[in-house]
Image: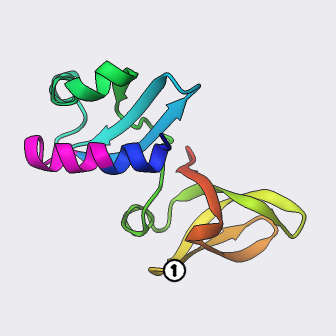
Amino acid sequence: MTSATLQHEIETRLAEREPDVEVLLVEVVGGGMARVFIDHPEGASLEVCERVTKALADVRERFALEVSSPGLERPLTKPDHFRRYMGRRARVRTREPREGRRSFTGQLVGVTDREVTIAADSGVIAIAYEEINCSNLVEE
């Protein structure tokens, strides 16, 4: 099962049982573990993580499940995530090299529904979402 498929399944389940919880990222690690990064308007407290873990009982039957808050270097996976953190520093890793590089770190200066624009050390670069392998905020 891919991470994207599992993320969709988890988002659908939590939309019913924990509608205030936002699923930021789901990673399937080594085929046997699922890491779920969540957020909540009041923060992803231990209590919220426990409720999410209980709501995902069927996922726990298939995977070792780890539910946690995103921390300071939170993942950015959707246009809304990038919009929310405009002006902050982020690292974007591309699937294929661009200008001989795969990793770009800089200030988020533009976000559309198709791409994100970063003012990196090497200059301003626009990267389409389908080209992004992974991205996250970077501590300032």
Residue 64 location, quadrant: top left
Q: Residue at x 42, y 69 (%)?
A: 79
Q: Horizontal and vertical percent for residue 110? A: 53, 78
Does residue 46 appear left or right of residue 137 in this picture? left
Position of 20 relative to 37 (above/below): below
- Residue 41 makes an appearance in the image: no
Give residue 101's quadrant in the image.
Answer: bottom right
Q: Which residues are magenta?
A: 9-21
Three-letter amino acid code of the residue under disc 1: Arg
The answer to whether residue 92 shows anywhere in this view is yes
**SS for dot 1:** loop
Please name the residue that numbered disc 1 is placed on. Answer: 114
Residues 6 and 82: in front is 6
Q: Is residue 97 left or right of residue 82?
A: right
Residue 129 on image: x %, y %: 56, 69
| Residue 19 among those drawn in magenta | yes
Packing grade of label 1 (10 A; few <14, some 14-19, many >=20) is few
Whole-percent x and y of residue 69?
Answer: 35, 33
In the picture, measured across the screen, residue 93 lies left or right of residue 1, that is: right
Identify the image's colour scheme: rainbow, by chain, secondary structure or one colour: rainbow
Residue at horizontal 55 percent and vertical 75 percent from the top: 109
User: In the image, is 98 to the left or to the right of 80?
Assistant: right
Quick one: 36 or 61, which is closer to the camera? 61
Q: Position of residue 26 (x, y in %)?
A: 42, 40
Q: Main secondary structure of the magenta part?
A: helix
Going 57% across and 57% down the picture, which residue do you hit?
89
Q: Does the stretch in magenta take in 11?
A: yes
The residue under the point 50% across, 44% down is 2
